[in-house]
Amino acid sequence: MLTNEHLFIKACRGLPTNRTPVWIMRQAGRYLPEYRAVREKVDFLTLCKTPELAAEVTVQPIDILGVDAAIIFSDILVLPEAMGMQLELVESKGPVFNEPIRSSGHIERLVKPDVREKLSYVIKAIEMTKETLRDRVPLIGFSGSPWTLAAYMVEGTGSKNFFNIKNLIYSEPKLAHKLLQMLSDLVADYLNDQIEAGCDAVQIFDTWGGILTPDDFKEFSLSYIEQIIKKVKDRNVPVIVFAKGTAHSLIDVAKSGCDVVGLDWTVDIGEARKLLYNKTAIQGNLDPVILFSTEKKIEEETEKILKKFGSGEGHIFNLGHGILPDTPVENAKFFVNAVKELSVKYHSTKETSAVF
């Protein structure tokens, strides 16, 4: 754990900071030439499973961009792979499970692994990253939410309408809940293992929560996220929930027990702050495409978000989703520096207690 509490951790807890911390989802990725140089040597999964290389690319954005937190380099789908599903990453299609789950028999054949053993390469990468970082910035661990993992496992890949997973919850809800409960237990174990290995915060990515109706989101996604948070909260590390496309349920997400609610770019951060005032911190939420624009536009949009959030604590600046692969590195650097410089005036150095 950090010897001196970093401003990212302080912001997660609603404590005073002298500026707004900033990091970027998917900040270790192929928009960086240094990352591409590593990827020329190995395929994506091999990179994930080689701790020395995973640690190297995790630290790259800290040195190159100057972000205020690192996030361990991995992929959410290593967990289903550890359960016995064969994962391929096809350049033109993305992640593919060649034998998706379509029946109770498929679920019965899933392995309930010892997560720390099966995903030991992630744990080793965390340990090596912590050693390299030497407390310069906090390290974030992560997992996909049970719902998002199930969506990939049942569809077999990404989808436009998610027919198969939706058909499962509508036609065989008990079977869906069985799969989601299995995943919930494993995700909790996985996050706890990451924390024990040295992660200073964890984020749950619910990428596909927004494909559900508000009621179904609560039943098939959020209820399992709540279970996970209850099992990791005694670890005394901040928990971030990023549920894309779920602006209809921000208060419910905040009530899950998380410390930080992540926003996608479709949410007005000022309105979100009013809803969540004194409940949780907020993370977000610049549209990633703005980083392809001019420095003037990037600065204007960054200022707009800071102004809408307003003065005070509990804001972690981020994009509203992952940084895009062809983003100009200089624009990413400019964005990070803009947040650091523009946010100072929204903070006071006066010592006060946490706001939530």
Image: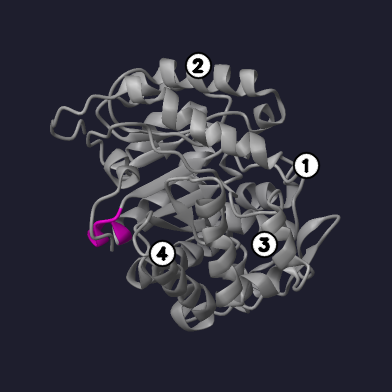
Residue 152 rendering spot, x and y as whole percentages = 67, 57
Q: Nearer the viewer, mark 4 or mark 3?
A: 4
**Distance in Å between CA atoms under marks 1 and 4:** 29 Å
Question: What is the number of callouts on the image?
Answer: 4
Residue highlighted by disc 1: 160
Whether pointer 1 and pointer 4 mark residues with C-beta atoms closer than 8 Å, the reply is: no
Which comes before the other along the chain, label 4 or label 2? 4
List x then y, in percent, for residue 348: 23, 24
Determine whether 318 is above or below 42 in the image: above
Amino acid at pointer 3 = Met
Q: Residue 45, relative to residue 199: is it above or below? A: below
Mark positioned earlier in the residue sequence (1 or 2): 1
- Residue 347 coordinates in the image, percent (x, y): 28, 24
Q: Is residue 188 above or below residue 295?
A: below
Residue 226 in the figure: left or right of residue 55? left
Q: Residue 153: give its label.
A: 3
Q: Which mark is residue 191?
A: 4
Label 3 to label 1: alpha-carbon separation:
15 Å
Confirm whether residue 83 shows in the render.
no
The magenta region covers 232-237
**Mark 2 → mark 3, Cα distance in angstroms:** 39 Å
Structural crowding at the residue carrying mark 3, measured as other residues with C-alpha within 10 Å and reported as few (<14), some (14–19) or many (≥20):
many
Which element is circle 1 on?
loop
Q: Earlier in the sequence, mark 1 or mark 4?
A: 1
